Image (spheres, coloured by chain):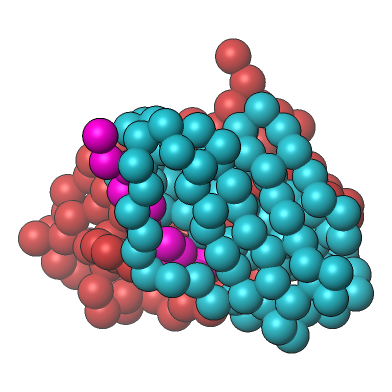
Chain colours: A cyan, B red
Amino acid sequence: DAKTTQPPSMDCAEGRAANLPCNHSTISGNEYVYWYRQIHSQGPQYIIHGLKNNETNEMASLIITEDRKSSTLILPHATLRDTAVYYCIVRGYNNNDMRFGAGTRLTVKP
Amino acid sequence: DGGITQSPKYLFRKEGQNVTLSCEQNLNHDAMYWYRQDPGQGLRLIYYSQIVNDFQKGDIAEGYSVSREKKESFPLTVTSAQKNPTAFYLCASRPGGGAGNEQFFGPGTRLTVL
């Protein structure tokens, strides 16, 4: 699986959009990009995933660059409850393991 | 309610004792996973199982053992050979087949070895 690089921490003002970047320059054609988040002392929560096209659901939007070497998770209107560690993961279609890096600690401030 | 159950939430053991952490799912998922998380760190994969009676080592399998006798259960044994077992342990499951399926996590068990 391709490795990912994320900034260790970010801050965001409440009500503003939070844009969390992820680099995955060694991604291959059949690998998906997943995003999860983990609120302190809980199990990670699935947010969104995509292959090539941009994706949107009720939680967030995922923007994947055309060359697929990077992506951005967008929380359109961050709230204090969005404070968490956000993990970007790349996993191949035929791989059943899921490996997490250190993630980005997002702090939403009032 | 469908989901993943891990029990207990907190577990204390004396050094040198084996301990088994429970993970049960009623989601009818084929694949199950065990992760370890240390304070301030990301998740590290211990073992995973794609089908019943089959499992593979992850990145940090030494000192751990698993079994998958039933689809809904994937217990993890932390043996006395694990040098530093105190950690937060997370179990997860996923429908089998294809990378487009999301992974669901349990609430975790915090193990403290005294």
Tell me if B49 is positioned left or right of B44 in this view: right
Q: Quadrant of residue B18?
A: bottom left
Q: A97 or A31, which lies in front?
A: A31
Residue at the image point whose x is 15% and y is 66% from the top: B15
* Residue B94 is at least partly visible in this image: no
Residue A61 screen position, x and y as percent: 68, 43
Q: B4 or B18, which lies in front?
A: B4
Residue at the image point whose x is 32% and y is 78% from the top: B81
* Quadrant location, the C terminus of chain B: bottom left
**Is B92 one of the magenta-colored residues?**
no
**Is A100 one of the magenta-colored residues?**
yes
Q: Is residue B1 above or below residue A15?
A: above
Residue B46 screen position, x and y as percent: 51, 68
Residue at the image point whose x is 66% and y is 28% from the top: A58
* Quadrant location, the N terminus of chain B: top right
Q: Which residues are magenta?
A: A97-110
Tell me if B112 is positioned left or right of B26 in this view: left
Residue at the image point whose x is 78% and y is 67% from the top: A65
Tell me if B71 is positioned left or right of A16 in this view: right
Tell me if A53 is positioned left or right of B27 in this view: right
Residue A98 screen position, x and y as percent: 64, 63
Q: As drawn, which residue projects farthest toward the bottom?
A: A26
Q: Is residue B55 above or below residue B32?
A: below
Residue B62 screen position, x and y as percent: 44, 79
